[in-house]
Amino acid sequence: MTASTQRTVLSLYIRVFRIARTWQAQSGVASDTLAERNYILQEARTLFRQNQQMTDQEAIKKCINECEARIEIGLHYRIPYPRATYLPQMGLATQRGRKLRAQQRLRKQAKPIYLESQEET
């Protein structure tokens, strides 16, 4: 990892923790605020530790872009949780048939950048 990439990652990590420290829930209820702050902190710790050993610059860049997108979406909508995508199960089927592999590949390609780290349910 280059020095500039390392600085970028560390600044994102610090930014997430600052956001969590000042986060206020939309409902204004103290328990909701505490739960959302804990979610932000736990999610950041989990994802940053999960990706700590990455060496591929392209993969690191994707993770940085995902983090920035999740921060901006969370601040804009005032919701710390990732926004769901609503695709019908067979909505991206090919014209020649509804083959499972092609369907899974198309769903993976259609996944927004801010949901890359989330597992498919």
Image (spheres, grey):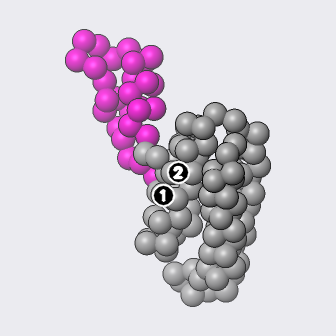
**Residue type (three-letter) at the residue carrying disc 2:** Glu
Residue at mark 1 to residue at mark 2: CA–CA distance: 5 Å
Label drawn at residue 66 = 2
| Residue, far left | 95
Q: Residue furthest top?
A: 96
Span shown in magenta? 84-111
Question: Can residue 69 be seen in this snapshot?
Answer: yes
- Relative to 38, say whether 87 is above or below: above
Name the side, left or right, on which 2 lies relative to 115.
Answer: right
Check disc 1 and give the amino acid type: Ala
Q: Residue 40: x percent and y percent?
A: 66, 66
- Establish if 117 lies above or below 102: below
Question: Quick one: SS at disc 1?
Answer: helix
Q: Are marks 1 and 2 in contact (CB under 8 Å)?
A: yes
Q: Which residue is drawn at 55% across and 36% down?
A: 58
> At x 69% / y 51%, what residue is drawn?
3
Residue 50, image x, y percentages = 74, 44
